[in-house]
Image (cartoon, rainbow, N blue to C red):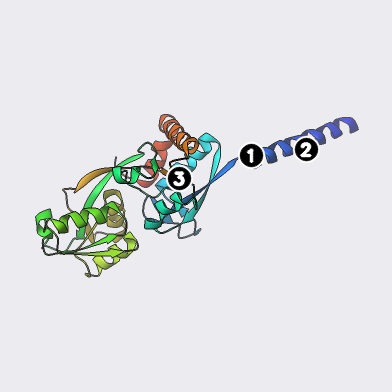
Amino acid sequence: MKASFQLSLLALFAAAIFSFSAQADSKVYNVGTEPTFPPFEMLDSDSGEITGFDIDLLKAIAEDQGFEVKIHSLGFDGLIPAVLTGKIDMAASGITITDKRAKVINFSTPYIEAGIGVLIRKDDASIKTLDDLKGKTAGVQIGTSGQKAAEDLKAAGKLANIVVMDNASLAVTDLLKGRVDTVINDIPVNNAFITKSGGKLIMLEKPLNKEEYGFVTAKNSKELLDMLNKGLANVRANGTYDKIYAKYFTTK
């Protein structure tokens, strides 16, 4: 019994060493996100932790590929510069894939289709179509494709003014308080704010465009990019992606 007990202790000790070594060898990547973009990234009111579709999906990919992620809160307009300077290893924040961005950073395989929509107050009868935006003021989040879409509308004479804000929540607050006439932002995010508003907000039926999101890495991070793409393909194939999607979205 004594010998057996000693062997058991040795086995447990060896297992503990192996477990520690596995944890020590696990690569940890620093991920930047701007957590005011529900349902893609947001702060959990109970735990104070950053959560959301992007975060859950990225963690599932990391588990599949055997690495870990550490999430950091950054301003949206600072995410790509932080990747370029090596402050973070990647960015996951509902980042639209564009040719301009792809010249300086790498995008993963697209993980969701989105688009830009026009959010308005339900009681505002003066805006029924995109043509009604002429003479109106739009709130946008800095550095987003929503800002670019608003600038294009203004340049075409289809929008009067643009108010640029640090995050989407501030823009929606100003919309609800009547300080701006509309918020131009990503459609899934607009839908989340519509739900949260309790029926005070609606979105124009016609979107401004269609887009796709991707995770962002530096140009020299081929190994990380390959793991992101392989992991994304795996979680799509095994049903994990669908479960995460169903947690945050009610429609496809």
Image quarter of residue 162:
bottom left
Identify the residue at horizontal 21%, vertical 67% (top origin): 180
Q: Amino acid at mark 3?
A: Asp
Name which residue type carries label 1. Answer: Asp
Residue on which disc 1 sits: 25
Vertical placement of residue 197 versus 12, above or below: below
Q: What secondary structure is marked by label 2?
A: helix
Report whether 250 appears left or right of 2.
Answer: left
The answer to whether residue 185 is visible is no
Please report the residue visible at 49 percent of the width from the left and 38 percent of the height from the top.
224
Residue 80 appears in the rendering: yes
Residue 218: horizontal and vertical position, in percent? 44, 44
Element at label 3: helix
**Dots 1, 2 in contact, CB < 8 A:** no
Q: Residue furthest right?
A: 2
Q: Is residue 29 left or right of residue 181?
A: right
Q: N-terminal of the two: label 3 or label 2?
A: 2
Q: Residue at x 42, y 48 (%)?
A: 92
Q: Which residue is mark 3?
A: 56
